């Protein structure tokens, strides 16, 4: 299976396209000839990216939307439908990460994280996957995380949401592959983006050695090439794959206990 061909009237919709992995994915899809719909909250940044991605061959349309707000999300989906553009490729990428002891977490930020990482991808997939299936052509890339593959204490809300993203994506992958639609969960380890500057003192940032970090561009490349081959799950780096492979036979409880000790913040 390959990605749907770019075509007049079709577009790739990318959430979180103003920065980091989403922006890198939008740049790669533009280079491949796709028109794009770029979603994030910060109008100025979105406009700057859209201006760079709009040329003689491709058009990038910036759409501001706070994806944690279900009314704004529904209005954005209606607006795209009414425009007549068909979403051939959906990339659910917008996100942020909470971390630290859950008992100290800001309850509203934890709920916003669920709205952004769980609710929004479900809403967008519900909106655009049926059209792809009826056209027998389309692709969905869900940016999950390696935190969605393991039990990660002190990242309970984030890793819980990423488990949902990964498991939801994998299930849909098997449902729609016979209909000619690709669905991939991208599960990167740490990527050099602004996510970490917005995540405060995050235990995962401290615990993972710098040589294991990759750039947003490398992450985007791995995700899109996995999607083009319709991989159910993509782990972008060999080091991570080897790491997970070697821990495969370790009992889950033991792994979680080790993770808790390694990630426990000082004084917790
Ligand atoms: N960086 C990593 O190490 C890493 C590893 C694994 C997985 N991931 C995942 O990769 C995805 C992208 O993260 P990134 O690392 O590229 O971070 P980033 O550079 O901070 O980008 C986050 C993007 O999400 C948008 N966003 C945040 N809150 C939003 C909201 N409420 N509504 C709409 N858009 C919103 C941001 O734009 P606005 O602020 O303008 O809205 C921005 O475009 C996330 O899902 C993250 O969990 C990242």
Image: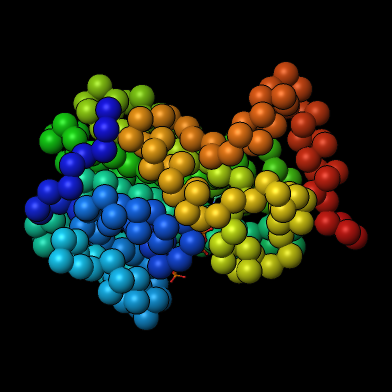
The residue that appears at 38% across and 42% down in the rendered structure is 224
The residue that appears at 37% across and 81% down in the rendered structure is 44
The residue that appears at 73% across and 26% down in the rendered structure is 247
Q: Residue furthest right?
A: 267
Number of marks in picture: 0
Say if residue 36 shows up in the picture.
yes
| In the foreground, 85 or 75 | 85
Q: Residue furthest bottom?
A: 44
Looking at the picture, does residue 163 appear above or below residue 86? above
Q: Quadrant of the C terminus?
A: bottom right
Say if residue 72 shows up in the picture.
no
The picture places residue 138, in percent across and down from the top left corner, at: 23, 39
The residue that appears at 28% across and 57% down in the rendered structure is 30
The image quadrant that residue 81 belongs to is bottom left
Left or right, 197 with respect to 36, comes to right
The image quadrant that residue 252 belongs to is top right
Q: Quadrant of the N terminus?
A: top left
Left or right, 115 with respect to 188, comes to left
Left or right, 153 with respect to 117, comes to right
| In the foreground, 100 or 60 | 60
The picture places residue 207, in percent across and down from the top left corner, at: 77, 51
Q: Give the color scheme: rainbow, by chain, secondary structure or one colour.
A: rainbow
The picture places residue 228, in percent across and down from the top left corner, at: 33, 35
The picture places residue 62, in percent across and down from the top left corner, at: 27, 70
The image quadrant that residue 97 belongs to is bottom right
């Amino acid at each position: 299976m390959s990605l749907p061909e770019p075509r007049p009237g079709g577009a790739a919709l990318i959430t979180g396209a103003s920065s980091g992995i989403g922006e890198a994915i939008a740049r790669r899809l533009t280079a491949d000839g796709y028109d794009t719909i770029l979603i994030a909250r910060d109008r100025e940044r979105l406009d700057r990216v859209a201006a760079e991605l709009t040329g003689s061959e491709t058009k990038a349309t910036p759409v501001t939307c706070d994806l944690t707000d279900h009314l704004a999300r529904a209005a954005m989906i209606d607006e795209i439908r009414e425009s007549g553009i068909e979403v051939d490729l959906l990339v659910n990428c917008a996100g942020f990460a909470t971390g630290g002891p859950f008992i100290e977490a800001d309850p509203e930020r934890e709920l916003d994280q669920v709205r952004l990482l769980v609710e929004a991808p479900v809403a967008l997939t519900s909106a655009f996957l049926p059209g792809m299936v009826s056209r027998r052509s389309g692709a969905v890339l869900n940016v999950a995380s390696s935190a969605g593959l393991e039990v990660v204490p002190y990242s309970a809300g984030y890793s819980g949401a990423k488990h949902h993203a990964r498991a939801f994506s994998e299930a849909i992958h098997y449902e729609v592959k016979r209909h000619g639609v690709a669905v991939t969960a991208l599960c990167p380890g740490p990527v050099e983006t602004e996510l970490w500057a917005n995540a405060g003192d995050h235990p995962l940032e401290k615990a993972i050695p710098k040589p294991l970090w990759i750039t947003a561009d490398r992450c985007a490349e791995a995700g899109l090439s996995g999607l083009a081959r319709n991989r159910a799950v993509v782990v972008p780096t060999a080091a991570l794959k080897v790491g997970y492979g070697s821990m495969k036979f370790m009992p889950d409880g033991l792994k979680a206990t080790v993770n808790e000790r390694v990630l426990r913040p000082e004084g917790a």
